[in-house]
Image: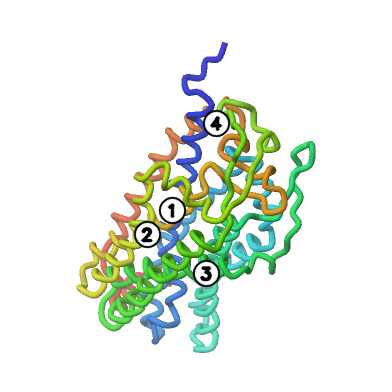
Amino acid sequence: MNTIPLDYETLRLIWWLLLGVLLIGFAVMDGYDLGVGALLPFVARSDDERRVLINLLGPTWEGNQVWLVLGGGAIFAAWPALYAASFSGFYLAMITVLLALILRPVAFKFRGKIKGPRWRATWDWALFIGGFVPALIFGVAVGNVLLGVPFNLDATLRPSYAGNFFGLLRPFALVSGLLSVAMLVTHGAVIIAARTEGMVALRARVYGRYAAVASIVLFALAGLWVSFLMDGYVVTSVQDPLGPSNPLNKIVTTSTGAWLANYGAHPWMIMAPALGLLGPVVAYLGLKGHAWKTSLLGSTLAIVGIISTAGLSLFPFLLPSSINPNASLTVWDASSSHLTLFVMLLATIVFLPLIIAYTAWVYRVMRGTVTATSIGRNPNAY
C-alpha cells in the first residue's frame, strides 16, 4: 500500500519549483558577489576603495554559495538523469566556473599579505575573473539549454555527449551570457551603492544604470530571437506524469517559436517576462534617484523575472536534446523515484527554513555602510 501522502505528479512539480527557487536564490544571494567582483577594477580605483568592496563581500560570500551547493545537490538527488547529462556535457564549462570561483577566497586571503601595488592589482583582477566568468558561463549554459544540447541516450538510458566546450559558444548562448553578466552587474552595483559612500557609490550608480539598460536590450533581443529565429521543442505524444522515469517513451518535434506555447496556454505566465523587463527599469530609476530600496527591489525582480522566463518557456523540458529530440529530459521522465522525492521534501521542509533564518541573522549582524574608516577599526578586515 502506498503511504506517501503526495502523488508522483505533485512531487515532480514541487521539485521543479524548488529547483527554480534554489537557482533564483543563488542568483539573488551570490549573484551580487559576482557582480561586485566584476565591477571591482572599474568602480574602485584606489587601494582603500578596493578594500571597501572586498570587505563588503568578505563576511557573507561563503554563506551565499550555499545556494549553489543546494542547487547542485537538488539536481543530483531529484533529477539524476539531468545531472548525468548536463554535468558531463558541460564538464569543461563547470570546471572553468569552479576554478574561477576558487580564485575569490584565494584572492581574499592573499591580497593583503603584501603591500606591493602589482601584487594587489593581480589579485584584484583575479576577483574580477571570479565574478565575470561564472556570470558569463551560467548564462551561456542557459542559452544552450534553450537551443538544445547535443546528447543522446542509449537503450540503458546512459547519456553520451557529442559536443565540446567551444561548441557552447553559439551566438544566442553568448547573448544569454552577456544578459546574465548585465543582470548580475546591475545587482552588484545596487549593493555597492546601498552599502558604500562617496565616489565608490557614485561610480556604482553610473555603471549600474549602464548595466540595467544593457539588461533590457539583451533580454528583449533574446525574446525576439526565441520568438522568430529559434526552434523550440514540443512533446507530441502522451506523457504520463505518474509514470516511471524513461525519457525514451515519448515523441518530440521542433518548430520555430515553440518555446512561447506555454504563454499562449497560460497567459498569467507573461508576468515573468514582464518582470524581466520592468525590473531593470525600476533598478535604473532607483539608482538614478539614490533610492537604494527601490533599486534593490528592481534588480531582484529582474533576476526573478529573467530566470523564471527561461524556466516557464522550457516547461516541461529540463534539457532538450538537439541530436535526438525524443531523448530530451522532461519533468515527467527524468526524476528520482516517488519515495526519494518525498523523503527529500521532508528534509527540505526541515533544513531550508534553518538556512534562511541563519542567512537573515548574518545579514542583520553585518548590516551597515562599509567605509575605509570602518575597516580601519576592524582587526579582521581584509
Residue at horizontal 40%, vertical 79%? 50
The numbered mark at residue 175 is: 3
The disc, 1 or 2, on the residue closer to the chain's N-terminal end is 2
Residue at horizontal 65%, vertical 51%? 86
Which amino acid type is marked by label 2? Gly
Pick whichever, 200 or 215, lies toward us.
Answer: 215
Residue 262 image position (x, y, % from top left)? 45, 45
- CB-based contact (under 8 Å), mark 2 and mark 4: no
In 3D space, how far apart are the residues under numbered discs 3 and 4 (Cα atoms)? 35 Å
> Which residue sits furthest right?
155
In 3D space, how far apart are the residues under numbered discs 2 and 4 (Cα atoms)? 31 Å
Instruction: Say which quarter of the image contains residue 219.
Output: bottom left
Residue 200 image position (x, y, % from top left)? 32, 80
Q: Is residue 50 above or below residue 380?
A: below
Residue at horizontal 29%, vertical 75%? 371
- Tag 3: Cα neighbours inside 10 Å, few (<14), some, or many (≥20)? many
- Tag 2: Cα neighbours inside 10 Å, few (<14), some, or many (≥20)? many
Residue 52 visible: yes
The disc, 4 or 1, on the residue closer to the chain's N-terminal end is 1
Pick whichever, 103 or 94, lies toward us.
Answer: 94
- CB-based contact (under 8 Å), mark 1 and mark 3: no
Which residue, given by chain and number where applicable, does mark 2 sit on?
A: 276
The disc, 3 or 4, on the residue closer to the chain's N-terminal end is 3
Instruction: Say which quarter of the image contains residue 268.
Output: top left
Residue 66 visible: no
Which residue, given by chain and number where applicable, does mark 1 sit on?
A: 309
The numbered mark at residue 341 is: 4
Helix, strand or loop at mark 1: helix
Q: Is residue 134 above or below residue 329?
A: below
- CB-based contact (under 8 Å), mark 1 and mark 2: yes
